[in-house]
Amino acid sequence: LLDRVMPKGKLGSAALGVLGTAALGLGATLLSVESFRSYGWGVFVLVPFCSGLLSVLLYGYHESRSLGECILVSILSVAILAGALIAVAMEGLICILMAAPLGAGLAVMGGLVGYAIQCHDGGRASAPPVIRALSLMVPLLLMAEHVGRPAAPLFEVRTAVEIDAPPAQVWPEVVAFTQLPPPTEWLFRAGIAYPERAEIKGQGAGAIRYCIFSTGPFVEPIEVWDEPRLLRFGVTENPPPMEEWTPYANVHPPHLDGYLVSEHGQFLLTPLADGQTRLEGTTWYRHHLWPARYWQCWSDFIIHRIHRRVLLHIKQLAEQTRTAVRPSDVPGGVRY
């Protein structure tokens, strides 16, 4: 069948190779995400690698192509797939950009394997069985991954600032801080959820703290209230981690619900010399995206930026309070 369908010209074979593999990749992604609710190795590793491989095998089906052309075709296959995911309202631009380095690199690796196959003696004869085998193996491997999904690892992010105020003046700003100004960081302006203010109902262990983000509130029951040293809390509700950039009015992919989950957090206040305080914020979280270490690079970076936005705001509030209550150093005056 492929002998009759595949064009022999470069443009026609490239177009069919790219569009055909993009369609197969879209089907595999829909199967994994919508049916299995899985954002794992299958979606982020298997699909882009196989897209690059299959596109090159189809492109070089009738005659060998150059290495540069094969790499270009492999990259185009995942670029078209990314566009298709946005077009069918399955993903937004932010997530596509985050996955792009991994997907493009794997597509090139697949393209290199396809190039090696077509260059080998008899390589073009082996292309049809390789294409059939991959078309069968990909959905089976996605199903196997769904059945044997591993537990999500627990990650920890710590961020600290030094504040020119004693812990007793920093503590009230930690417990509940006022409205932050609109963000200027590109990350938050691009759609990543960002903190706006914090409120608390009650006092001491058992009180409920609400950290209000641009996408909704984190609900944080207080577990340790050691004033003015340690505030530790659990997290019972998480808002969506971002608002997607999309041409559609509303896109809500499954990974916005329960795939990046904060479980615990704390603020640790350590007194320093000259009445200063080291304020350290820590978040313990899980994400259900694989490869876990690749996505941890993104999630750690984002959480660090969230921490800094909060900690610098607390620093500003506490230092303003200290300035307001500090008396002038006049002769005979009292110093605190």
Image (cartoon, rainbow, N blue to C red):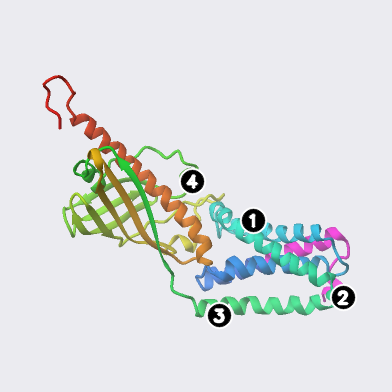
Q: Which residue is mark 2?
A: 121
Bin the neighbour count of mark 2 within 10 Å (Cα to Cα): few under 14, some 14-19, many 20 and up.
few
Q: Amino acid at mark 4?
A: Leu
Q: CA distance from mark 2 to mark 1?
A: 36 Å
Helix, strand or loop at mark 3: helix
Give the label, 4 or 1, closer to the camera: 4
Q: Main secondary structure of the magenta part?
A: helix
Question: Residues in magenta?
Answer: 1-23
Vertical placement of residue 264 versus 46, above or below: above
Q: Residue at x 70, y 65 (%)?
A: 109
Q: Nearer the viewer, residue 243 or 103?
A: 103
| Sequence-first disc among 4 and 2 | 2
Residue 85, image x, y percentages:
60, 59
Q: Which residue is mark 4?
A: 187
Q: Which residue is mark 1?
A: 83
| Sequence-first disc among 3 and 4 | 3
| Sequence-first disc among 2 and 3 | 2
Q: CA distance from mark 3 to mark 4?
A: 35 Å
Q: Amino acid at mark 1?
A: Gly
Q: CA distance from mark 3 to mark 1?
A: 27 Å
Q: CA distance from mark 4 to mark 2?
A: 50 Å
